């Protein structure tokens, strides 16, 4: 069964909702967000490797990771604070990329048990403005990849 | 493609969305479009101009009249523009799922 990720980004709003059903018990879905090593693994992709620098998974704990390109150059850093960290239920966190021109965003992650072996993640993200949200939506396409390093251009060209 | 206006901005306005809905049903002249609204013709013209600039509407000369068509292809681009972002998260979540399916808790 195909479990597609859905995005709801209504016009004229400064938030968006990402939903996804998983063929996993809710405990394992949460574990992937709780364990820094596992988080690093699934957040990384061919053109960017995520390294967690700080991951204090508790209320008021801080987190930080950096994203490096294939050559090992740090492309961007992201950090924030966990405002809520409730096992198998909820993570509320802030997210920002310093010096990126984007302001802080607020993420509400809700973990729902569907059956013993299936679960659902609902992620509501609130941006400071409609313009910032729309710019962020375009990010993986262009800005995000060449934000810091022009050398990523060749990767972008391959994606075209 | 260098558009003077952002497509998202164009469809953010309720009047402009209403115009798109009308024109999607049939090609219309500016005055026929304006008849559907309480706003002044000048205001509606401005909205039509914005929609035309970002290619959501297309003009066609028919005798002395100009008709506006809805450009459905452009509407699809709006959906496409979210697609890379959706794909990014879909790839991550697919990966998460396959990693966790193999996961063995450490005792």
Image: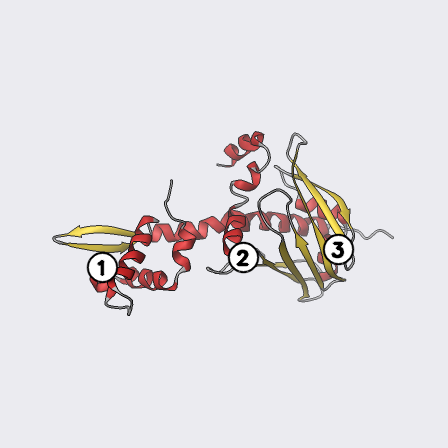
Circles 2 and 1, Cβ within 8 Å, touching? The answer is no
Q: Position of residue A89 (x, y in %)?
A: 72, 64
Q: Position of residue A94 (x, y in %)?
A: 67, 55
**Which image quarter holds the N terminus of chain A?**
bottom right
Q: Which of A56 and A71 is in front in this view?
A: A56
Q: Which of B102 and A16 is in front in this view?
A: A16
Q: Name the residue under label 3.
A: A31
Q: Residue at x 39, y 57 (%)?
A: B11
Tags 2 and 3 both on a single chain: yes
Q: Position of residue B43 (x, y in %)?
A: 29, 61
Q: Which of A74 and A121 is in front in this view?
A: A74
- Helix or strand or loop: what does disc 2 sit on? strand
Report whether residue B101 is seen. no
Left or right: B91, with B44 as reference point: right
Image mark 1: chain = B
Q: Which residue is drawn at 46% across and 49% down?
A: B81
Q: Name the residue under label 1.
A: B30
Q: Which residue is drawn at 51% across and 40% down?
A: A142
Q: Which scheme is used to colour this image of the protein?
A: secondary structure
Circles 2 and 3, Cβ within 8 Å, touching? The answer is no
Q: Nearer the viewer, residue A158 or A54?
A: A54
Image mark 2: chain = A
Q: Mark 2 points at which residue?
A: A7
């Amino acid at each position: 069964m195909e479990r597609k990720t859905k995005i709801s980004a209504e016009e004229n709003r400064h938030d968006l909702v990402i939903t996804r059903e998983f063929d996993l018990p809710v405990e394992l879905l949460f574990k992937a967000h709780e364990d820094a090593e596992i988080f690093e693994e699934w957040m990384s992709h061919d053109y960017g490797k995520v390294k967690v620098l700080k991951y204090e998974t508790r209320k008021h704990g801080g987190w930080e990771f950096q994203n490096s390109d294939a050559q090992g150059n740090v492309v961007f850093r992201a950090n924030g604070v966990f405002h809520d960290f409730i096992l198998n239920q909820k993570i509320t966190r802030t997210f920002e990329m310093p010096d990126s021109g984007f302001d802080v965003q607020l993420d509400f992650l809700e973990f729902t048990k569907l059956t013993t072996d299936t679960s659902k993640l609902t992620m509501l993200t609130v941006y400071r403005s409609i313009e910032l949200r729309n710019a962020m939506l375009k990010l993986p396409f262009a800005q995000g990849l060449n934000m810091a390093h022009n050398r990523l251009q060749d990767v972008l060209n391959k994606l075209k | 493609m260098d558009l003077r206006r952002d497509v998202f901005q164009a469809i953010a306005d309720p009047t402009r969305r209403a115009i798109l809905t009308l024109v999607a049903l049939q090609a219309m002249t500016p005055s026929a479009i304006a008849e559907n609204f309480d706003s002044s013709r000048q205001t509606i013209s401005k909205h039509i101009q914005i929609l035309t600039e970002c290619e959501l509407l297309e003009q066609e000369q028919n005798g002395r009249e100009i008709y506006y068509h809805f450009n459905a292809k452009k509407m699809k681009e709006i959906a496409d523009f979210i697609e890379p972002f959706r794909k990014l998260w879909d790839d991550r979540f697919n990966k998460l799922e396959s990693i966790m399916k193999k996961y063995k808790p450490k005792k």
